[in-house]
Amino acid sequence: MEKKRDLWQRFSGYLVVAAGILLLIALVQVLGLNELAAAGEGSEATAVPPTIEPVSDAAAATAVTRTNNLPTAPLPVLHDNSLAPVPNPHTYQAQLPTHNFKIHVVTDFDTPNSIALQYGISADTIIGGNANISRESNLLQTGAELVILPVDGVLHTVKPGETLDSIAALYGVPVADIIGFPSNNLEVPFLRLIPDSQLVIPGASLGQFTFRAPKSVGNSGGTQQWAVVGTGAYIWPVSGRCLTNYYSGFHPGIDVSMAEGSPVYAADTGTVTYAAYAAGIYYDYGNLIVINHGNGYETFYAHLSGINVYPGQIVYQGDYIGATGNTGRSSGPHLHFEIRSNDYGQNPLNRLAGPVRSCS
Protein backbone atom coordinates (compact mmCIF):
# COMPACT_ATOMS: atom_id res chain seq x y z
CA MET A 1 0.00 0.00 0.00
CA GLU A 2 2.78 2.36 0.81
CA LYS A 3 4.43 1.71 -2.55
CA LYS A 4 1.20 2.64 -4.40
CA ARG A 5 0.90 5.85 -2.36
CA ASP A 6 4.47 6.88 -3.18
CA LEU A 7 3.85 6.28 -6.90
CA TRP A 8 0.72 8.45 -6.91
CA GLN A 9 2.47 11.24 -5.06
CA ARG A 10 5.27 11.24 -7.60
CA PHE A 11 2.80 11.29 -10.55
CA SER A 12 0.81 14.13 -8.94
CA GLY A 13 4.01 16.12 -8.59
CA TYR A 14 4.72 15.71 -12.28
CA LEU A 15 1.21 16.92 -13.14
CA VAL A 16 1.66 20.01 -10.99
CA VAL A 17 4.99 20.78 -12.68
CA ALA A 18 3.47 20.35 -16.18
CA ALA A 19 0.53 22.56 -15.33
CA GLY A 20 2.90 25.24 -14.09
CA ILE A 21 4.88 25.12 -17.30
CA LEU A 22 1.70 25.44 -19.39
CA LEU A 23 0.55 28.39 -17.26
CA LEU A 24 3.93 30.05 -17.66
CA ILE A 25 3.83 29.66 -21.49
CA ALA A 26 0.32 31.15 -21.61
CA LEU A 27 1.42 34.08 -19.47
CA VAL A 28 4.41 34.75 -21.75
CA GLN A 29 2.19 34.77 -24.84
CA VAL A 30 -0.27 37.20 -23.25
CA LEU A 31 2.55 39.52 -22.22
CA GLY A 32 4.04 39.39 -25.75
CA LEU A 33 0.76 40.36 -27.38
CA ASN A 34 0.34 43.29 -25.03
CA GLU A 35 3.85 44.57 -25.86
CA LEU A 36 3.11 44.37 -29.60
CA ALA A 37 -0.12 46.30 -29.12
CA ALA A 38 1.70 48.94 -27.12
CA ALA A 39 4.37 49.25 -29.83
CA GLY A 40 1.66 49.72 -32.50
CA GLU A 41 -0.03 52.41 -30.49
CA GLY A 42 3.28 54.17 -30.06
CA SER A 43 3.98 54.25 -33.81
CA GLU A 44 0.54 55.61 -34.54
CA ALA A 45 1.10 58.26 -31.95
CA THR A 46 4.21 59.50 -33.75
CA ALA A 47 2.33 59.74 -37.04
CA VAL A 48 -0.60 61.70 -35.59
CA PRO A 49 -0.17 65.43 -35.00
CA PRO A 50 -0.03 66.39 -31.31
CA THR A 51 -3.30 68.33 -31.49
CA ILE A 52 -6.05 66.47 -29.63
CA GLU A 53 -9.57 67.01 -30.80
CA PRO A 54 -12.75 65.77 -29.11
CA VAL A 55 -14.10 62.53 -30.58
CA SER A 56 -17.70 61.43 -30.46
CA ASP A 57 -18.73 58.13 -28.87
CA ALA A 58 -19.65 56.64 -32.25
CA ALA A 59 -16.30 57.58 -33.79
CA ALA A 60 -14.47 56.13 -30.79
CA ALA A 61 -16.38 52.87 -31.10
CA THR A 62 -15.51 52.68 -34.79
CA ALA A 63 -11.82 53.29 -34.05
CA VAL A 64 -11.77 50.54 -31.45
CA THR A 65 -13.44 48.13 -33.84
CA ARG A 66 -10.84 48.87 -36.55
CA THR A 67 -8.00 48.50 -34.08
CA ASN A 68 -9.21 45.12 -32.89
CA ASN A 69 -9.97 43.69 -36.34
CA LEU A 70 -8.04 43.05 -39.57
CA PRO A 71 -8.31 45.72 -42.36
CA THR A 72 -11.44 45.29 -44.48
CA ALA A 73 -9.83 46.65 -47.76
CA PRO A 74 -6.43 46.04 -49.41
CA LEU A 75 -3.82 48.75 -49.24
CA PRO A 76 -3.59 50.90 -52.47
CA VAL A 77 -0.81 50.09 -54.98
CA LEU A 78 0.99 53.18 -56.31
CA HIS A 79 2.21 53.29 -59.94
CA ASP A 80 4.81 55.87 -60.98
CA ASN A 81 4.36 56.66 -64.68
CA SER A 82 5.81 60.16 -64.60
CA LEU A 83 8.56 59.21 -67.08
CA ALA A 84 6.44 57.10 -69.44
CA PRO A 85 5.69 58.74 -72.89
CA VAL A 86 2.12 59.44 -73.83
CA PRO A 87 1.05 56.52 -76.05
CA ASN A 88 0.26 57.44 -79.71
CA PRO A 89 -1.44 54.61 -81.58
CA HIS A 90 -1.64 56.59 -84.86
CA THR A 91 1.01 56.42 -87.65
CA TYR A 92 1.17 59.29 -90.18
CA GLN A 93 -0.24 58.29 -93.57
CA ALA A 94 0.78 60.46 -96.54
CA GLN A 95 -2.15 61.54 -98.72
CA LEU A 96 -2.30 61.13 -102.46
CA PRO A 97 -2.91 64.27 -104.55
CA THR A 98 -6.60 64.88 -105.26
CA HIS A 99 -6.57 66.70 -108.60
CA ASN A 100 -9.76 67.21 -110.55
CA PHE A 101 -8.64 68.19 -114.04
CA LYS A 102 -10.81 69.10 -117.00
CA ILE A 103 -10.42 67.00 -120.15
CA HIS A 104 -10.52 68.58 -123.63
CA VAL A 105 -11.21 66.51 -126.76
CA VAL A 106 -9.42 67.97 -129.80
CA THR A 107 -11.67 68.92 -132.73
CA ASP A 108 -10.80 69.49 -136.39
CA PHE A 109 -10.27 73.24 -136.04
CA ASP A 110 -8.52 73.31 -132.67
CA THR A 111 -5.08 74.86 -132.30
CA PRO A 112 -2.89 75.03 -129.21
CA ASN A 113 -3.62 78.72 -128.86
CA SER A 114 -7.38 78.36 -129.32
CA ILE A 115 -7.51 75.59 -126.70
CA ALA A 116 -5.38 77.62 -124.30
CA LEU A 117 -7.57 80.70 -124.80
CA GLN A 118 -10.69 78.65 -124.05
CA TYR A 119 -9.36 77.63 -120.63
CA GLY A 120 -7.38 80.74 -119.70
CA ILE A 121 -3.95 79.08 -119.76
CA SER A 122 -0.87 79.33 -121.96
CA ALA A 123 -0.34 77.01 -124.92
CA ASP A 124 2.80 75.70 -123.19
CA THR A 125 0.64 74.44 -120.31
CA ILE A 126 -1.07 72.04 -122.73
CA ILE A 127 2.35 70.41 -123.14
CA GLY A 128 2.93 70.69 -119.39
CA GLY A 129 -0.18 68.67 -118.64
CA ASN A 130 0.33 66.19 -121.48
CA ALA A 131 4.02 65.32 -121.70
CA ASN A 132 3.25 62.47 -124.10
CA ILE A 133 2.13 64.77 -126.93
CA SER A 134 4.44 66.29 -129.51
CA ARG A 135 5.55 69.90 -129.30
CA GLU A 136 4.67 70.14 -132.97
CA SER A 137 1.31 71.91 -133.14
CA ASN A 138 0.36 70.36 -136.45
CA LEU A 139 0.58 66.88 -134.88
CA LEU A 140 -2.34 67.52 -132.53
CA GLN A 141 -4.67 64.70 -133.50
CA THR A 142 -8.44 65.15 -133.77
CA GLY A 143 -10.13 63.17 -131.00
CA ALA A 144 -7.10 63.25 -128.69
CA GLU A 145 -7.93 63.85 -125.03
CA LEU A 146 -5.91 66.58 -123.34
CA VAL A 147 -5.54 67.17 -119.59
CA ILE A 148 -6.20 70.84 -118.83
CA LEU A 149 -4.31 72.11 -115.80
CA PRO A 150 -6.04 74.81 -113.71
CA VAL A 151 -2.91 77.03 -113.73
CA ASP A 152 0.08 77.53 -116.00
CA GLY A 153 2.59 74.84 -115.14
CA VAL A 154 3.56 71.18 -115.46
CA LEU A 155 2.05 67.92 -114.21
CA HIS A 156 5.03 66.02 -112.77
CA THR A 157 5.06 62.28 -112.03
CA VAL A 158 7.09 61.61 -108.86
CA LYS A 159 9.96 59.15 -109.29
CA PRO A 160 11.41 57.01 -106.46
CA GLY A 161 14.06 58.93 -104.54
CA GLU A 162 12.89 62.38 -105.64
CA THR A 163 12.47 65.16 -103.09
CA LEU A 164 10.66 68.47 -103.19
CA ASP A 165 14.02 70.22 -103.43
CA SER A 166 15.14 68.14 -106.42
CA ILE A 167 11.80 68.64 -108.22
CA ALA A 168 11.84 72.38 -107.58
CA ALA A 169 15.42 72.59 -108.89
CA LEU A 170 14.46 70.58 -111.99
CA TYR A 171 11.87 73.18 -113.03
CA GLY A 172 13.47 76.25 -111.45
CA VAL A 173 10.51 77.09 -109.22
CA PRO A 174 10.28 77.72 -105.43
CA VAL A 175 9.52 74.73 -103.21
CA ALA A 176 6.85 76.83 -101.49
CA ASP A 177 4.86 77.07 -104.73
CA ILE A 178 4.64 73.27 -104.98
CA ILE A 179 3.67 72.91 -101.32
CA GLY A 180 1.14 75.73 -101.61
CA PHE A 181 -0.86 74.15 -104.45
CA PRO A 182 -3.87 72.75 -102.51
CA SER A 183 -4.63 69.55 -104.42
CA ASN A 184 -1.00 68.36 -104.11
CA ASN A 185 -1.95 67.49 -100.50
CA LEU A 186 1.55 68.06 -99.13
CA GLU A 187 1.05 68.22 -95.36
CA VAL A 188 3.46 70.30 -93.29
CA PRO A 189 5.77 69.27 -91.61
CA PHE A 190 5.85 65.77 -93.14
CA LEU A 191 5.94 66.71 -96.86
CA ARG A 192 6.19 63.08 -97.93
CA LEU A 193 6.13 62.23 -101.64
CA ILE A 194 4.50 59.10 -103.00
CA PRO A 195 6.23 57.54 -106.06
CA ASP A 196 4.10 57.52 -109.25
CA SER A 197 1.77 60.20 -107.86
CA GLN A 198 1.42 63.43 -109.85
CA LEU A 199 2.14 66.93 -108.57
CA VAL A 200 1.17 70.21 -110.20
CA ILE A 201 4.27 72.41 -110.50
CA PRO A 202 2.94 75.98 -110.88
CA GLY A 203 4.95 78.23 -113.17
CA ALA A 204 7.03 75.41 -114.70
CA SER A 205 7.35 74.74 -118.43
CA LEU A 206 8.33 71.81 -120.65
CA GLY A 207 8.73 73.98 -123.76
CA GLN A 208 6.61 75.64 -126.39
CA PHE A 209 4.54 74.53 -129.35
CA THR A 210 6.02 75.06 -132.79
CA PHE A 211 4.56 74.83 -136.25
CA ARG A 212 6.45 72.94 -138.93
CA ALA A 213 5.15 73.77 -142.34
CA PRO A 214 4.68 70.79 -144.68
CA LYS A 215 7.62 70.49 -147.04
CA SER A 216 5.76 70.66 -150.33
CA VAL A 217 9.02 71.00 -152.27
CA GLY A 218 11.54 68.18 -152.48
CA ASN A 219 13.22 65.59 -154.62
CA SER A 220 12.50 61.89 -154.86
CA GLY A 221 14.11 60.35 -151.79
CA GLY A 222 17.27 61.24 -149.97
CA THR A 223 18.18 64.48 -148.22
CA GLN A 224 16.61 67.68 -149.54
CA GLN A 225 19.00 69.56 -151.76
CA TRP A 226 18.23 73.24 -152.08
CA ALA A 227 19.02 75.05 -155.30
CA VAL A 228 20.00 78.24 -153.49
CA VAL A 229 21.44 79.05 -150.08
CA GLY A 230 20.73 82.20 -148.14
CA THR A 231 23.28 84.81 -147.14
CA GLY A 232 22.79 84.24 -143.41
CA ALA A 233 22.01 87.94 -142.92
CA TYR A 234 18.40 89.13 -142.72
CA ILE A 235 16.59 92.31 -143.68
CA TRP A 236 13.31 93.55 -142.27
CA PRO A 237 10.43 91.94 -144.18
CA VAL A 238 8.27 95.08 -143.85
CA SER A 239 8.98 98.78 -143.59
CA GLY A 240 7.53 99.17 -140.08
CA ARG A 241 9.40 98.89 -136.74
CA CYS A 242 6.44 99.22 -134.37
CA LEU A 243 5.97 95.95 -132.43
CA THR A 244 2.74 94.80 -130.79
CA ASN A 245 4.26 91.55 -129.49
CA TYR A 246 7.82 90.43 -128.82
CA TYR A 247 9.55 87.05 -128.96
CA SER A 248 9.15 84.91 -125.81
CA GLY A 249 8.74 81.34 -124.67
CA PHE A 250 5.02 81.70 -125.37
CA HIS A 251 5.38 83.61 -128.64
CA PRO A 252 7.95 82.28 -131.14
CA GLY A 253 8.24 85.45 -133.26
CA ILE A 254 7.57 89.19 -133.42
CA ASP A 255 4.38 90.99 -134.48
CA VAL A 256 4.96 94.13 -136.54
CA SER A 257 2.00 96.49 -136.79
CA MET A 258 1.28 97.38 -140.41
CA ALA A 259 -1.72 98.62 -142.37
CA GLU A 260 -3.48 95.82 -144.21
CA GLY A 261 -2.11 95.29 -147.72
CA SER A 262 1.39 96.61 -146.96
CA PRO A 263 4.13 94.83 -148.97
CA VAL A 264 6.06 91.93 -147.46
CA TYR A 265 9.58 91.07 -148.69
CA ALA A 266 11.77 87.97 -148.42
CA ALA A 267 14.13 88.46 -145.49
CA ASP A 268 16.81 86.33 -147.21
CA THR A 269 17.35 84.23 -150.31
CA GLY A 270 15.77 80.77 -150.34
CA THR A 271 13.11 78.40 -151.67
CA VAL A 272 9.40 78.82 -150.89
CA THR A 273 8.24 75.61 -149.21
CA TYR A 274 4.75 76.66 -148.11
CA ALA A 275 2.37 79.26 -149.51
CA ALA A 276 -1.29 78.75 -148.55
CA TYR A 277 -3.96 79.42 -145.98
CA ALA A 278 -2.95 77.48 -142.87
CA ALA A 279 -6.29 75.71 -142.46
CA GLY A 280 -7.43 73.24 -139.81
CA ILE A 281 -5.04 72.96 -136.92
CA TYR A 282 -2.72 75.49 -138.61
CA TYR A 283 -5.47 78.11 -138.35
CA ASP A 284 -3.51 80.42 -136.03
CA TYR A 285 -1.23 81.54 -138.86
CA GLY A 286 -3.87 82.39 -141.45
CA ASN A 287 -2.31 82.97 -144.87
CA LEU A 288 1.27 81.76 -144.47
CA ILE A 289 4.50 81.78 -146.47
CA VAL A 290 7.51 79.71 -145.40
CA ILE A 291 10.93 80.14 -147.03
CA ASN A 292 13.73 77.60 -146.51
CA HIS A 293 17.13 79.26 -146.83
CA GLY A 294 19.10 76.05 -147.44
CA ASN A 295 21.41 76.58 -144.45
CA GLY A 296 19.23 75.16 -141.68
CA TYR A 297 17.19 78.36 -141.33
CA GLU A 298 13.59 79.11 -142.28
CA THR A 299 11.50 82.28 -142.12
CA PHE A 300 7.73 82.43 -141.53
CA TYR A 301 5.40 85.22 -142.70
CA ALA A 302 1.89 84.90 -141.24
CA HIS A 303 -1.59 86.57 -141.21
CA LEU A 304 -1.12 87.75 -144.79
CA SER A 305 -3.95 89.25 -146.83
CA GLY A 306 -2.32 88.11 -150.08
CA ILE A 307 0.25 85.59 -151.28
CA ASN A 308 2.38 86.37 -154.33
CA VAL A 309 4.59 83.26 -154.52
CA TYR A 310 4.13 79.51 -154.92
CA PRO A 311 5.79 76.43 -153.39
CA GLY A 312 9.08 75.58 -155.09
CA GLN A 313 9.72 79.12 -156.25
CA ILE A 314 13.22 80.53 -155.66
CA VAL A 315 13.18 84.01 -154.17
CA TYR A 316 16.00 86.41 -153.43
CA GLN A 317 16.50 88.71 -150.53
CA GLY A 318 14.20 91.71 -150.86
CA ASP A 319 11.78 90.12 -153.37
CA TYR A 320 8.11 91.00 -152.92
CA ILE A 321 6.27 87.87 -151.69
CA GLY A 322 2.88 89.03 -150.33
CA ALA A 323 0.87 91.59 -148.36
CA THR A 324 0.18 92.07 -144.64
CA GLY A 325 -3.28 91.24 -143.36
CA ASN A 326 -5.46 90.08 -140.48
CA THR A 327 -6.15 86.40 -141.27
CA GLY A 328 -6.15 83.46 -138.88
CA ARG A 329 -6.06 84.14 -135.13
CA SER A 330 -5.21 87.80 -135.28
CA SER A 331 -6.34 90.85 -133.31
CA GLY A 332 -5.56 93.39 -136.05
CA PRO A 333 -3.52 93.99 -139.23
CA HIS A 334 0.11 93.02 -138.68
CA LEU A 335 2.87 90.66 -139.82
CA HIS A 336 3.85 87.75 -137.59
CA PHE A 337 7.50 87.02 -138.48
CA GLU A 338 9.63 84.08 -137.29
CA ILE A 339 13.19 82.89 -137.83
CA ARG A 340 13.86 79.24 -137.06
CA SER A 341 17.08 77.24 -136.96
CA ASN A 342 16.49 73.52 -137.51
CA ASP A 343 12.89 73.98 -136.38
CA TYR A 344 13.85 75.84 -133.17
CA GLY A 345 12.62 79.38 -132.76
CA GLN A 346 15.12 82.25 -132.69
CA ASN A 347 14.54 85.81 -131.56
CA PRO A 348 14.30 87.75 -134.85
CA LEU A 349 15.56 90.92 -133.15
CA ASN A 350 18.92 89.20 -132.70
CA ARG A 351 19.18 88.97 -136.51
CA LEU A 352 17.54 92.21 -137.67
CA ALA A 353 19.36 95.54 -137.55
CA GLY A 354 17.96 98.86 -136.46
CA PRO A 355 15.90 100.22 -133.55
CA VAL A 356 12.33 99.16 -132.74
CA ARG A 357 9.58 100.60 -130.58
CA SER A 358 6.56 99.20 -128.81
CA CYS A 359 3.11 100.19 -130.04
CA SER A 360 1.03 97.79 -127.94
Image (cartoon, rainbow, N blue to C red):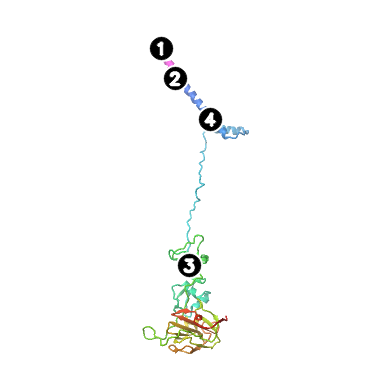
How much space separates mark 3 and mark 2, taking CA atoms? 107 Å
Judge by depth and name the residue closer to the eye, 356 or 156.
356
Instruction: Look at mark 4 in the image and give the residue it sits on.
Output: 39
Q: Answer with mark 1 or mark 2, whichever residue precedes in sequence.
A: 1
Quadrant in the rendering for residue 294 = bottom left
Instruction: Find out whether the residues at labels 1 and 2 contact each other: C-beta distance under 8 Å.
Output: no
Say whether residue 57 is visible.
yes
Q: Answer with mark 1 or mark 3, whichever residue precedes in sequence.
A: 1
Q: At numbered mark 1, what does the secondary structure look like: helix, strand or loop?
A: helix
Point out residue 336 in the picture as x, y percentages from the top left corner: 51, 83
Instruction: Look at mark 2 in the image and give the residue it sits on.
Output: 18
**Badge 3 amino acid:** Ala
Q: Is residue 79 above or below residue 274?
A: above
Q: Answer with mark 1 or mark 4, whichever residue precedes in sequence.
A: 1
Magenta-colored segment: predominant secondary structure = helix
Instruction: Look at mark 1 in the image and give the residue it sits on.
Output: 6
Point out residue 179 in the picture as x, y percentages from the top left corner: 51, 65
User: For residue 332: magenta?
Assistant: no
Instruction: Look at mark 3 in the image and give the residue it sits on.
Output: 169
Of labels 1 and 3, the one closer to you: 3
Toward the top, the furthest residue is 2
Q: Quadrant of the N terminus?
A: top left
**Badge 1 amino acid:** Asp
Q: Answer with mark 4 or mark 2, whichever residue precedes in sequence.
A: 2
